[in-house]
Amino acid sequence: MLRKLLTPILFVIAAALLAAIGYWNINPDSFSDRPTKPGSENAIDFYVINAKTVQYQVDGKLHYEMTTDKLKHLKATDITLLSNPNLDLYRGSDFPWHVRSERGEVAPEGKEVELIDKVRVERTDAKGRPTILTTSRLTVFPEKEYAQTQQAVRIDAANGVTTAQGMKAYLNDGRMLLLSNVRGQHEVR
């Protein structure tokens, strides 16, 4: 009779032992819905305060000079966030384009730059005439020397004001396409 009870008791003890070992080997965090490292997707692997970058062309002329209050690099996405970026784009010319915004995002390898909030692009030509373009968002493709936006655009030039919804700018050609709702108020001299 003792033998009949001993076998089930041994099975119960063995099962309890296996359950205890299994419990201690299981990580309780594996059952939670939250990631083990909160914010790991937006982890910043480096940042720079008061950053300044200068690039020259092959012939030694100044290509651009950029400053930003704060630069943060997100490790997971390889995106760089900019605070108050300010760019002087010379492209070998004596009359640079001044580009600034409140925020910016630079895609991996710098192939795309998104300027966000209060974007302002301005230039004064050789005759001292200013041209100022303002919009809320502008995407720049530096390698293609191309910029675009789907947002409202305002261009203040020496002879008038032009507004539009959306724009494509081909920087090499000095050509700009205004996409829709184009309105102009120009002064005839």
Image (cartoon, grey):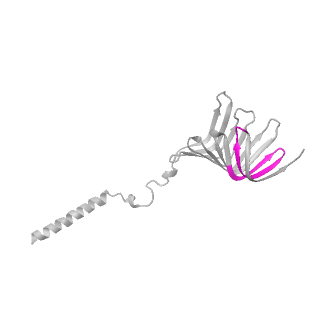
How far across and how far down the image is residue 125, in percent?
A: 79, 37
Q: Quadrant of the C terminus?
A: top right
Q: Which residue extends farthest bottom?
A: 1
Q: Which residue shows up at 61% across the image and 40% down it?
A: 51
* Magenta extent: 149-173
**Left or right: 31 with respect to 129?**
left
Q: Quadrant of the N terminus?
A: bottom left
Q: Quadrant of residue 31?
A: bottom left
**Left or right: 28 with respect to 17?**
right
Q: Quadrant of residue 108?
A: top right
Q: Which residue shows up at 50% across the image and 51% down it?
A: 41
Residue 116, placed above or below residue 109: below
How far across and how far down the image is residue 49, in percent?
A: 60, 43
**Left or right: 151 with respect to 127?**
left
Residue 172 is a magenta residue: yes
How far across and how far down the image is residue 151, in percent?
A: 69, 53
The overriding secondary structure of the stretch rendered in magenta is strand
Foreground: 63 or 21? 63
Foreground: 119 or 28? 119
Foreground: 10 or 171? 171
Residue 82 is a magenta residue: no
